[in-house]
Amino acid sequence: MFRLALSCNDRQISKFLPLLRAHCSVLSAATNALQITSEGFENENREIDFDVLFQSCNKLHLVKPLHGLLVVSGKIKSVFTSTKLVNYYANLGDVSFSRHTFDHISNKNVYTWNSMISAYVRIGHFSEAVDCFSKLLLTSNLQPDFYTFPPALKACGNLIDGKKIHCSVLKLGFEWDVFVAASLLHMYCRFGLADIARKLFDDMPVRDNGSWNAMISGYCQSGNAVEALGVLHEMRLEGVNLDPITVASILPVCAQSDDIISGLLIHLYVIKHGLEFELFVSNALINMYAKFGILGHALKVFDEMAVRDVVSWNSIIAAYEQNDDPITAHAFLTKMQRVGLQPDLLTLVSLASIVSQLNDRRNSRSVHGFVMRRGWLMGDIVIGNAVVDMYAKLGVIDSARAVFEELPVKDVISWNTLITGYAQNGLSSEAIEVYQLMEECSEIIPNQGTWVSIIPAYSHVGALQQGMKIHGRVIKNCLYLDIFVGTCLIDMYGKCGRIDDAMYLFYQVPRKSPVPWNAIISCHGVHGHGSKALNLFREMLHEGVKPDHVTFVSLLSACSHSGLVTEGQQCFHVMQKEYGIKPNLKHYGCVVDLFGRAGHLEMAYDFIKSMPVRPDACIWGALLGACRIHGNMELGALASDQLFEVDSENVGYYVLISNIYANVGKWERVGKVRSLARDRGLKKTPGWSSIEVNNKVDVFYTGNRTHPRYEEIYDQLRNLTAKMKSLGYIPDYSFVLQDVEDDEKEHILTSHSERLAIAFGIISTPPKTPIQIFKNLRVCGDCHNATKFISQITEREIIVRDSNRFHHFKDGVCSCGDYW
DNA sequence: TTAGGGTTAG
């Protein structure tokens, strides 16, 4: 409309005015004012009274067309009037109209420029604001004033520009203007030069609340929580009262530094000084309580608010979403829409997480569509990353990848999200590939999140050498004392068989939280060092660290791997009685495993029957696994019946039960189970083993003949088998699950993936050096026996990690004592 | 007649 009006000639305009008046005539007071003004416009060649015009046109939504008419006819002579229009459009959020207006003002003054700069800043278009500021300096003959600097300082994107602006401030003598000074303080803090800010602050002749707030929020935004609280303390000592802005700045600091006491005291101050009905304050309180996990307090603040904006709603939604209550979070979202508030970008960020927590694949598509239709996916990286994360968590990793590829800008979090997505869906090789692609982008600098996502992927495929390289970089970045990175490294060394290194690292990292303890206990567990795991648990208690539910999973599983039945039972008891931890299905599964592995199959079954919750597939799976080890076909059949009722999709269980039948030669039943699996469209997970030689991971599938050195590998295996037999090795055909002749059975056993990997290790590493391999499923019993012989013949230490635990072979024996 | 310092995020 505006553009249309600009292209009108005088005749057209005079035709348009009566239409305008006719339109206005339906509205009384405003219309009168408009009528008088526009008559004045028509009859007299004088400047229009814009204030009157504004008031009336604003109500009628007619500012734009009138503005067009007035500009064209040259009625706006005063630069103040036209600049006012720049601000008018900016307040409407229509910065392109502001710019259009701005560009048509021929006699701009500094007020005009200031208005344009701050219009850009207000909507966050900082680079345009900086451009505008530079043009003011370079192309106009005007000088900036003290209104120009605060928005310019807010907009500047780097320290160099910031310092230039500071010079300009000094030259013009605005340094001690409280507004300009606060902006300078904030700018220096933002770019990590808090000491320069502090010096300026100390030198200020006059300080107001804004100066103190700038210091506090500056410290806070550069991550210096302690200093921020320090400034707050000084402020109190000088008798300055906190205003709503101080409170809204400091509350996130309390949350960030986990300082509940300060948070509560500030809330008390808020109530005492009547600040509790300030919107920003309430919103900040909700967020703080949510971070502390005190949802009751967050809800109380929310309930008592007289006015709520979209931030309030987003905050209460995120509070529940981030505290594992997606259902309540979603209920708030529905309420928010019911009161007529439109969700914004951050609402959708929460919704993406809610949908993935609810495992709701159908609605994930709607979220994606909604975000795309609004154009947010292309414009904002946070929502883009949230959508990638949503798909990854739902296991729809191809969609996650597709969204990732389409993001116009990718930051380190986008990459970390995708790497974690692959790793957590068991696709470690893909995770590693993506990480390597990321390393090729020079503009992306890996951070803590990157290490936490890539280290587990390396440890999953047993790439110790690659993992150690990452360890080196972590040390360089001083992140080795970070609890999360440290724990990943402990886990990696443990899973790669380097338990001493894991222990060394464990004693370096902070150990106040149970997280690193859980990792080291679990490491000892999978190595079959049950007593050591129990000792570590006692040490943990001695150091005053409170165990959590994960600690007991690690501990129970450690006991079950080492056959410590009594100790395991005690742990299960202590967990409930002393620590008040209600057992979940994982704990129950460990106990079933504890009894089952030790051969107490009836005890395991009785335990399942006594459970207060419905057993899931893992529970029956544990019993079935135990039946496989101890060859109990009857109980195995019972377990599998129950299993297929709760989970008929997991192919592993079909394999287990068919193994039990094959073991006792019931080939007919084997055939039945297999065809059942086939009918349900399930394919057996192929077994593979991997080995890392010279920084490269080689993967072998059973019977694999595609490896470039396969002939040498099979030669090596033939030689070994001959030597093994002379030492008393007898192949155990019960591990061959096909009904074939004995010759063929021996060949099948020899080409199991674990044996191919071991043979490859023997031919490609120096004699007598240790070999470490990884198997994705459980190691086969015959291979276990064979490896004992191989370790004796080759005088090598052979470490095999399977999906269950470690087997450490040396001099013809295994550390697990054949208990696994 | 324009300005500072403020709450939510992957």
Image: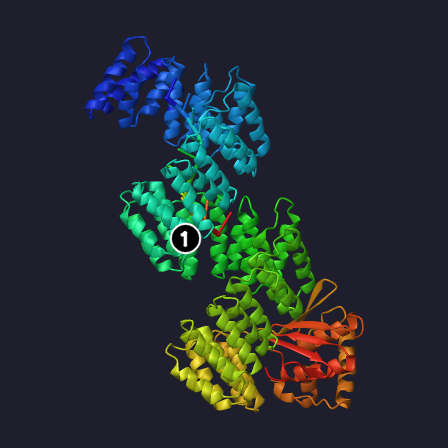
Residue A49: quadrant of the picture: top left
Tell me the residue at 22%/22% (across/down): A31
Q: Measured along the vertical axis of the image, is residue A149 above or below residue A645? A: above
- Direction from residue A260 to residue A335 in the image, left or right: left
**Image point (47%, 67%), residue name:** A546
Looking at the rendering, which quadrant does residue A247 occupy? top left
Callout 1, which amino acid?
Ile
Can residue A37 be seen? yes
Instruction: Indicate the position of residue A337 as horizontal and vertical percent values.
Output: 31, 48
Disc count in the image? 1
Relative horizontal placement of residue A28, taking residue A494 as reference (left or right): left
Residue A351 visible, this angle: no
Q: Nearer the viewer, residue A174 or A425?
A: A174
On the image, the x and y values in percent for residue A774 come to 65, 72
Quarter holding the C terminus of chain A is: bottom right
Q: Position of residue A421 (x, y in %)?
A: 53, 59
> Which residue occupies the foreground of this view, A331 or A559?
A559
**Residue pointed to by mark 1:** A260
Element under label 1? helix
Q: Is residue A594 above or below residue A284?
A: below
Q: Which quarter shows the N terminus of chain A?
A: top left
> Which sits in the foreground, A35 or A539?
A539
Q: Give the chain letter at badge 1.
A: A
Q: How is the image coloured?
A: rainbow
Q: Residue A13: x, y in percent?
A: 33, 16
Instruction: Give the residue displayed 44% in from the left and 41% down from the top.
Output: A232
